[in-house]
Image (cartoon, grey):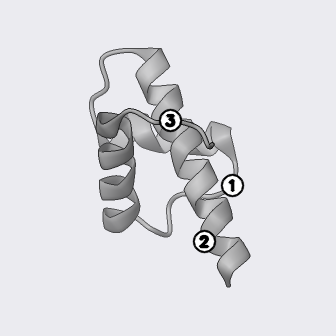
Amino acid sequence: MGNITQQYIARVAVELLEKHPDDFTLDFQNNKKMVSEYCTVDSKNVRNKIAGYISRKVKQKRKEE
């Protein structure tokens, strides 16, 4: 079994990665700033979850290449 991610977090993260693929990196801190810049998130917790999910997706994509 893997991690279970809320559908909202996964959907927002995938949309951000599609719109701005070059802006996100493996660095969580950088991704946190980018998520805050590109979308309005109500809480830090949700922002951090989106940034963490993006970091994992970028890592997976680089492994595949």
Circle nearer the N terminus (3, 2): 3
Q: Answer yes or no: do the residues labelled 3 and 2 have beta carbons within 8 Å?
A: no
Q: CA distance from mark 1 to mark 2?
A: 11 Å
Q: Which residue is mark 3?
A: 4
| Front-most of residues 4 and 14 | 4
Q: Quadrant of residue 46?
A: top left
Q: Which residue is mark 1?
A: 26
| Front-most of residues 36 and 13 | 13
Mark 2 crowdedness (10 Å alpha carbons): few <14, some 14-19, many ≥20: few
* Picture residue at 72% right of the left edge, 73% below the top: 63
Q: Position of residue 47 (x, y in %)?
A: 44, 28
Q: Which residue is mark 2?
A: 61
The amino acid type, in three-letter code, at marker 3 is: Ile
Residue 27 vertical position relative to residue 49 in the rendered view, above or below = below
Which of pointers 3 and 1 indicates the residue nearer the eye?
3
The amino acid type, in three-letter code, at marker 1 is: Leu
Which of pointers 3 and 2 indicates the residue nearer the eye?
3
Q: Quadrant of residue 30?
A: top right
Q: CA distance from mark 3 to mark 2?
A: 19 Å
What kind of element bears circle 2? Answer: helix
What kind of element bears circle 3? Answer: loop
* Picture residue at 52% right of the left edge, 50% below the top: 54
